[in-house]
Amino acid sequence: MKAEKVEKKKIDLSKISNIVIPMLFIVLVLNIMTTKSDKLFEIIGYRSYTVLSGSMEPEFYPGDMVITKHKSKTDIKVNDIVTFKDNDGIIITHRIIEETPEGYITKGDNNNVEDADILTEENIIGEVKFSIPKLGYLNDFLSKPMVIAVEMILLAGFIFFSYRD
């Protein structure tokens, strides 16, 4: 009897990393650019925000990342969750509970009272389309200038060592 050789397919980590690392870099760069540029946010249509409070629990928890679609690319209506700037310029993500002739009334799902200010169309940033649990904390960390500098150095090293002869 001949012993049959079973070939195990090896996973080539270098091929996987050649795809995954540049894709992560592109996503990170686009996220940073849309966070810093309102014009680019309007063109791309999406921007991420990190939930900081428990006002929208159980829908979103602190540290969750919410992905907001630009207001020009969606129809805002009652019961939508929107990201907006309040009258003090603070960015908030709450649910629209009522539409009035003056604008919208919003409220956090976990709050006992409605928001004090009437939300007007010009203060709306966009509609929340989905969330990713706890990814907001990681995104905030990776978006710090010192961390971005380290990411660039690592990317340069990756490119150098991956493509040298």
Image (spheres, rainbow, N blue to C red):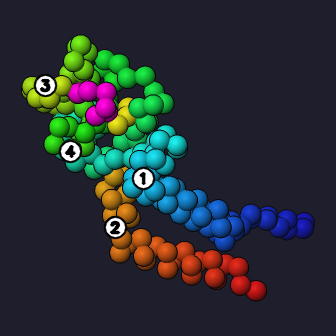
At label 3, counting other C-alpha atoms closer than 10 Å, the crowd grade (few under 14, some 14-19, many 20 or more) is some
Residue 21 falls in image quadrant: bottom right
In the image: residue 90, left or right of residue 80 = left
User: Which label belongs to residue 37?
Assistant: 1
Which of the two discs, 1 and 2, labels the residue nearer the N terminus?
A: 1
Residue, disc 4: 90
User: Which label belongs to residue 114?
Assistant: 3
Amino acid type at mark 2: Lys
Whole-percent x and y of residue 67?
Answer: 41, 41
Q: Secondary structure at mark 1?
A: loop
Amino acid type at mark 1: Ser
User: Which label belongs to residue 144?
Assistant: 2
Contact, CB < 8 Å: mark 1 with mark 2?
no
Whole-percent x and y of residue 120?
Answer: 26, 27
Which of the two discs, 1 and 4, labels the residue nearer the N terminus?
A: 1
Contact, CB < 8 Å: mark 2 with mark 3?
no
Q: Cα distance, mark 2 to mark 3?
A: 34 Å
Q: Cα distance, mark 2 to mark 4?
A: 20 Å
